[in-house]
Image (tube, helix red, strand yellow):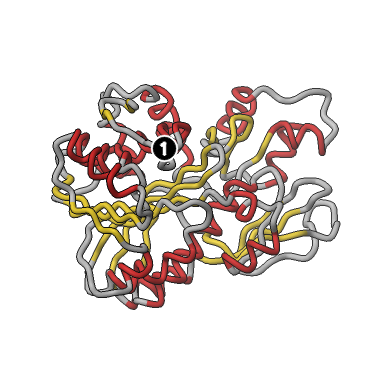
């Protein structure tokens, strides 16, 4: 097998070629981090993610490849040898390994099949002696985070989901909130550096800083989003609203969830400087990073123009550039979002958006 410049074999070990974009995107993210990094690649499987991180980034000093599957270990060992790497192979269950002592990894990669929730407690337990580290988390249970499996979301993430047009951002914010809960138990505050929603997964890179005050401050970033299924009115706040302020219908809600920033502007710019790499998806990565920079300072949640056209019975779907131009002409900030190709983010309130489109 070949992925970018890496040659490797899979045998019968799980390998998802559709995640190549994700691995490239977050290899850039790893390269944008400061310092010489000790990395733990949890759920290594063939080792392709960790191998790429180390081969493509000068700041990655050493990687521990953690894998519980007996059959994966010889494949992983061959792939390291083939790529002339001396990474440490750890043949153990993720949660058992992290809960077995205190570790000093600078970047931990959690990339399981499904939800990452069962692995959060052991991660922060094992890292509790660190003053700062970075955490990269993948969640592929988007049906749970993004609405259709609402009961499972309450069970796993301790939040109510909402299956509507901005459900992918809602799911991202619920995931951040759940990570924050585990971080708080060990007095870590979190800062999202980049939050990606793509295809069937959500992936985050967060900075984790030790300090009770930082953990407490995170709690101030939590709240709810109230939503009207009738007219698409929405409002994010500390408390849910039972009545739509636009049409007086009874509202639905999601939360509690993270209402703070999803991206760090300075970090995104550092990633953009690395987009000279000759990845297969480098143009798409650059485009998404551009959208993220535009949306980084926007309020939570986006407006999908197709959904608004349907709910407001417009004669047609408004042109994206026309809507952005009109909002900016009224001195509002407005931009596309990486969450949906037919959606915009703006600091204009709901009534202002209605005035422009109707």
Instruction: Estimate the x, y position of residue 69 in percent, counting from the top left.
Output: 38, 54
The part of the image, by quadrant, that contains residue 296 is top left
Q: Which residue is drawn at 29% across and 71% down?
A: 126
Judged left or right of residue 173, residue 52 is: left
- Classed neighbour count for the residue bearing mark 1: other residues with Cα under 10 Å, few (<14), some (14–19), many (≥20): many
Label 1, on which residue? 22
Closest to the observer, 134 or 313: 134
Q: Residue at x 44, y 32 (%)?
A: 17
Instruction: Estimate the x, y position of residue 352 in percent, counting from the top left.
Output: 68, 41
Q: Which residue is drawn at 19% across and 49% down?
A: 34
The part of the image, by quadrant, that contains residue 308 is top right
**Which quadrant of the rendered structure holds the N terminus?**
top left
Instruction: Estimate the x, y position of residue 102 in percent, counting from the top left.
Output: 23, 73
Q: Which residue is drawn at 62% across and 25% down?
A: 320
Q: In this view, does 358 lie above or below 173?
A: above
Judged left or right of residue 289, residue 175 is: right
Q: Secondary structure beneath disc 1?
A: helix
Instruction: Estimate the x, y position of residue 256 in percent, counting from the top left.
Output: 60, 66
């Amino acid at each position: 097998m070949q992925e970018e410049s890496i040659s490797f074999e899979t045998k019968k070990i799980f390998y998802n070629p559709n995640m190549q974009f994700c691995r490239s995107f977050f290899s850039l993210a790893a390269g944008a981090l400061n310092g010489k990094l000790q990395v733990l690649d949890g759920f290594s499987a063939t080792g392709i993610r960790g191998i790429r991180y180390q081969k493509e980034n000068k700041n990655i000093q050493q990687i521990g490849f953690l894998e519980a599957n007996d059959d994966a270990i010889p494949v992983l060992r061959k792939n390291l040898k083939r790529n002339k790497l001396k990474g440490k192979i750890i043949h153990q269950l993720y949660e058992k390994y992290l809960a077995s002592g205190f570790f000093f990894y600078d970047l931990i990669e959690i990339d399981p099949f499904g939800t990452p929730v069962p692995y959060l407690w052991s991660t922060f337990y094992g890292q509790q002696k660190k003053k700062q580290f970075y955490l990269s988390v993948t969640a592929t249970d988007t049906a749970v985070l993004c609405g259709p499996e609402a009961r499972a979301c309450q069970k796993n993430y301790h939040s109510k989901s909402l299956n509507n047009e901005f459900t992918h951002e809602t799911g991202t914010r619920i995931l951040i909130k759940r990570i924050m809960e585990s971080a708080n138990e060990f007095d870590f505050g979190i800062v999202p550096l980049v939050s990606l929603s793509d295809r069937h997964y959500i992936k985050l890179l967060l900075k984790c800083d030790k300090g009770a005050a930082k953990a407490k401050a995170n709690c101030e970033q939590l709240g709810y989003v109230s939503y009207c299924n009738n007219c698409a009115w929405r409002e994010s706040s500390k408390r849910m609203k039972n009545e739509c302020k636009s049409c007086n219908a009874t509202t639905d809600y999601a939360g509690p969830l993270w209402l703070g920033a999803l991206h760090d502007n300075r970090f995104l710019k550092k990633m953009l400087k690395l987009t000279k790499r000759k990845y297969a998806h480098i143009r798409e990565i650059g485009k998404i990073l551009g959208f993220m920079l535009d949306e980084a300072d926007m309020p939570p949640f986006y407006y999908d123009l197709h959904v608004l056209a349907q709910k407001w019975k417009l004669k047609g779907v408004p042109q994206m550039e026309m809507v952005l131009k009109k909002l900016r002409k009224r001195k509002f900030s407005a931009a596309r979002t990486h969450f949906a190709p037919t959606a915009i983010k703006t600091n204009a309130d709901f009534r202002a958006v209605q005035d422009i489109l109707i």
